[in-house]
């Protein structure tokens, strides 16, 4: 049974694998046997050391995902280096906090370009290859704000609501090519992204008070869901948004 989750011989691109959730997911996929291309705009020595220590290959790919100009090259170079591409994890994402009445065009465009536009065009580039090569797995990182409104983060909420829509649409069109497109919606995970919330005693207490698991999540908490959605175990799971939230949405 555990063989269904084995990723030996598979190659995964994980965006934003330097820190936080992306780092946890890249490490989890490597623990299950995959080789990893860590795509981001700064080297990832910690992630690289951990994955190399497992005896898996790790390649850092320098790309600014706030723009779309290097997306095709990332896919082409991954295939050139490893001879295959099986899994894409669209994890890289940014957030901008500003009151809705003051929210700037820059804070809108930057977040949408990175969290939604790059996610789509990288998925498209990978899917074109996967279609002609037996299939693959695309995992998008959504959010609780794919379901809820949130406050002071309007472009982030728009992007993450969009991520679930794109996930379902791509799943619908690509399932017939044995490409499964799914999303993981993390709850409140302690990372750089949530640092401002954790440091705000009022917001931090409000958030913790609503989490049935009674703790903030850790990047490692995402490993199991990611390995499941990257592996043969999820071959008939398509267009699903899997919350890993300590029970937040059920509250
Ligand atoms: P994080 O540590 O800030 O991770 C974001 C990652 O994206 C980092 O590796 C970052 O690289 C990378 N990145 C930022 N700008 C980039 C750019 N222009 N080009 C390439 N890479 C870029 O925060 P995180 O919480 O782990 O976030 C990961 C994902 O989870 C995001 O999509 C976020 O929206 C989502 N999420 C987080 C939570 C949470 O509670 N933490 C909840 C729901 C969803 P650098 O560090 O090198 O800048």
Image (spheres, rainbow, N blue to C red):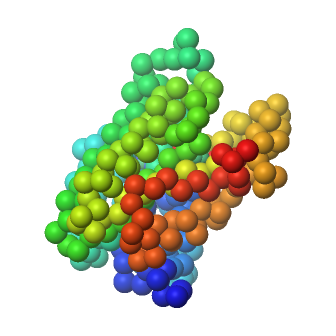
Task: Name the residue: 46% across, 83% down.
Answer: 4
Evaluate whether residue 52 shows in this view. Answer: no
Closer to the camera in the image, 85 or 241: 241
Count the marks. Answer: 0
Within the image, what quadrant is residue 37 found in? bottom left
The spot of residue 23 in percent (x, y) is: 55, 61
Task: Name the residue: 23% across, 74% down.
Answer: 134
The spot of residue 80 in percent (x, y) is: 22, 71
Quadrant holding the C terminus: top right
Closer to the camera in the image, 193 or 184: 184
Q: Is residue 96 above or below residue 219?
A: above
Task: Name the residue: 40% across, 55% down.
Answer: 239
The spot of residue 209 in percent (x, y) is: 82, 42
Task: Name the residue: 59% across, 42% down.
Answer: 144
Relative to 185, is 60 on the left or the right?
left
Q: Is residue 107 above or below residue 205?
A: above
Q: Is residue 48 above or below residue 31?
A: above
Return the residue found at the far top.
101
Evaluate whether residue 245 shows in this view. Answer: yes
The spot of residue 45 in percent (x, y) is: 53, 65
Within the image, what quadrant is residue 78 found in? bottom left
Closer to the camera in the image, 155 or 75: 155
């Amino acid at each position: 049974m555990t063989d269904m989750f084995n990723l030996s011989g598979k190659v995964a691109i994980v965006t934003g694998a330097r820190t936080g959730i992306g780092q946890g997911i890249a490490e989890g996929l490597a623990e299950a046997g995959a080789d990893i291309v860590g795509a981001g705009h700064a080297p990832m020595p910690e992630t690289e050391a951990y994955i190399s220590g497992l005896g898996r290959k790790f390649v850092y790919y320098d790309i600014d995902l706030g723009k779309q100009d290097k997306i095709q090259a990332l896919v082409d170079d991954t295939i050139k280096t490893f001879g295959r591409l099986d899994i894409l994890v669209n994890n890289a994402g940014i957030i901008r906090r500003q009151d809705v009445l003051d929210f700037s065009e820059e804070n809108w465009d930057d977040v949408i370009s990175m969290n939604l536009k790059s996610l789509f065009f990288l998925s498209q580039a990978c899917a074109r290859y996967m279609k002609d090569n037996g299939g693959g797995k695309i995992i998008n990182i959504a959010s609780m704000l794919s379901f809820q409104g949130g406050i002071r983060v309007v472009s982030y909420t728009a992007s993450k609501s969009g991520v679930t829509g794109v996930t379902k649409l791509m799943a619908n069109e690509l399932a017939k090519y044995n490409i499964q497109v799914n999303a993981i919606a993390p709850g409140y995970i302690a990372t750089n992204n949530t640092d401002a919330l954790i440091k705000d005693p009022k917001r931090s207490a409000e958030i913790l008070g609503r989490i049935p698991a009674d703790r903030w999540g850790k990047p490692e908490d995402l490993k199991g869901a990611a390995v499941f959605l990257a592996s043969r175990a999820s071959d008939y799971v398509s267009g699903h948004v899997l919350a890993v939230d300590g029970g937040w949405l059920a509250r």
